[in-house]
Image (spheres, grey):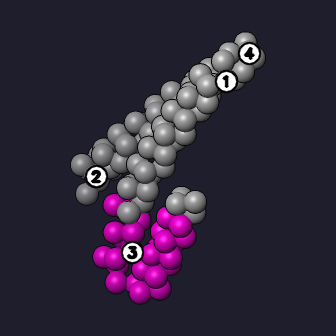
């Protein structure tokens, strides 16, 4: 499979979507800072913070999906037991941290 394979295009599309989502999130954070600067109602600010946190969680989920679909899947198909254990340990560690 070449550089322009279906998998490569999907990965590139996923990366572009993630970057677009992060750009929107960056704007959302700037908007929250503007709300604080303008002394907006605290509950409105907290509501926007919750929305930003949810958007960031969505980005995290998408990146983890890509990691499992590519890095973990590659470790499994490689037959390299040490690499498989490392990838599973990494995934368990990050999932444990994400649950906090």
Residue 27 appears anywhere in the view: yes
Marks 2/3 in contact by CB < 8 Å: the verdict is no
Query: Which part of the image, by quadrant, shows the C terminus?
Result: bottom right
The dot on residue 42 is 1
Q: Secondary structure at mark 1?
A: helix
Where residue 92 appears, x then y in whole percent? 49, 71
* Picture residue at 44% right of the left edge, 39% below the top: 18
Q: CA distance from mark 3 to mark 4?
A: 51 Å
Residue 34 appears anywhere in the view: no
Marks 1/4 in contact by CB < 8 Å: the verdict is no
Looking at the rendered image, the disc whose residue lies closer to the viewer, 2 or 3, is 3
Where residue 91 appears, x then y in whole percent? 48, 68
* Picture residue at 24% right of the left edge, 49% below the top: 6
Assess disc 3: are there few (<14), some (14-19) or many (≥20) residues with their C-alpha within 10 Å of its C-alpha: some
* Picture residue at 53% right of the left edge, 67% below the top: 96
Assess disc 1: are there few (<14), some (14-19) or many (≥20) residues with their C-alpha within 10 Å of its C-alpha: few
8 or 38: which is nearer to us? 38
90 or 7: which is nearer to us? 90
92 within the magenta span: yes
Q: Which residue is mark 4?
A: 39
42 to 100, vertically: above or below? above
Q: Which residue is mark 2?
A: 7
Looking at the rendered image, the disc whose residue lies closer to the viewer, 2 or 4, is 4
Picture quadrant of residue 32: top right
Q: Which residue is mark 3?
A: 75
Q: Secondary structure at mark 4?
A: loop
């Amino acid at each position: 499979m070449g550089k322009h394979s279906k998998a490569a295009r999907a990965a590139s599309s996923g990366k572009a979507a993630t970057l677009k989502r992060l750009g929107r999130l960056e704007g959302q954070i700037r908007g929250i800072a503007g709300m604080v600067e303008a002394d907006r109602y605290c509950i409105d600010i907290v509501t926007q913070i919750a929305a930003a946190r949810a958007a960031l969680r969505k980005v995290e989920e998408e990146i983890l999906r890509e990691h499992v679909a590519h890095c973990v899947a590659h470790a499994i198909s490689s037959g390299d037991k040490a690499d498989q254990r490392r990838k599973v340990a990494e995934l368990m560690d990050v999932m444990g941290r994400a649950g906090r």
